[in-house]
Amino acid sequence: MMVWRGNGLHVLNERPYRITRGDLFYIRAEDKHSYTSVNDLVLQNIIYCPERLKLNVNWQAMIPGFQGAQWHPHWRLGSMGMNQARQVINQLEHESNGRDPLANEMAELLFGQLVMTLKRHRYATDDLPATSRETLLDKLITALANSLECPFALDAFCQQEQCSERVLRQQFRAQTGMTINQYLRQVRICHAQYLLQHSPLMISEISMQCGFEDSNYFSVVFTRETGMTPSQWRHLSNQSD
């Protein structure tokens, strides 16, 4: 699954992810996932049947989670990777609807090309390669992912990248449907939800790990974003387990 623009909340196996332009997920048949709180969200699902793949390709090395391969579901794609993937997907859609004798073979070839394109261009959400020629927006989203525990200074980022803060704010909102502060706050809240459900840390410790120095302020923001207090969220999550 690839996100082209907009934003939303993607819940994968009970873990929430705030998704926006460039997010890439590999979802297995046994996974449970859903979307909520969407805002102009445009995404692409590529559905395939593993047992019908005939090409002599090491699919397990290309697709995380393929038939028992190591699974890491969440990645990022930069602008260059998104553009190349979109071109292949357009061709794949055409061949998938084709009726000529070679349509299925062409579709599988294009699927293989897409899988390799994604492997070539994907990167960990908080680790944009140093040699990358990606856009400022890609670099900004990676920098935000690295700021879960510490303050993020947009002015320092813009000074380092020699860009206009006003223009970058406009570009971010146009592509994601959110302000930079809204995105960072919601990414932190998603991380807090995960820690509340899967760690024994105290709420005050979780607030620190999610960039909130004041646990009372963290509780106020968490309640506003989720509709329940951190304690209520933890209790409800433990009950569902």
Image (cartoon, rainbow, N blue to C red):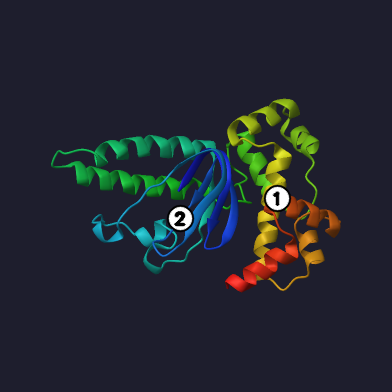
Give how far across and how far down residue 62 sits, in percent.
40, 56
Q: Nearer the viewer, mark 2 or mark 1?
A: 1
Q: Is 145 on the left or on the right of 96, as rendered? A: right
- Give the residue pinned by disc 1: 225
Q: Is 109 on the left or on the right of 132, as rendered? A: left
Q: Earlier in the sequence, mark 2 or mark 1?
A: 2
Give how far across and how far down residue 44 sits, in percent.
43, 43
Query: Residue at position x 13%, y 42% from top?
Result: 101
The answer to whether residue 158 is visible is yes
Distance (Cα) linking label 2 and label 1:
27 Å
Relative height, residue 83 to residue 202 (above, below)? above
Relative height, residue 134 to residue 218 (above, below)? above
Q: Amino acid at mark 2?
A: Tyr
Q: Nearer the viewer, residue 92 or 220?
A: 220
Query: Residue at position x 46%, y 34% from top?
Result: 83
- Give the residue pinned by disc 2: 26
Q: Count neighbours of disc 2 (C-alpha within 10 A) and say few if under 14, some if 14 to 19, many if 20 or more.
A: some
The answer to whether residue 213 is visible is no
* Image mark count: 2
Q: Count neighbours of disc 1 (C-alpha within 10 A) and say few if under 14, some if 14 to 19, many if 20 or more.
A: some
Give how far across and how far down residue 4 sits, in percent.
50, 38
Query: Residue at position x 79%, y 57% from top?
Result: 219
Q: Amino acid at mark 1?
A: Glu
Q: Is 2 on the left or on the right of 165, as rendered? A: left
Q: Nearer the viewer, residue 84 or 241?
A: 241
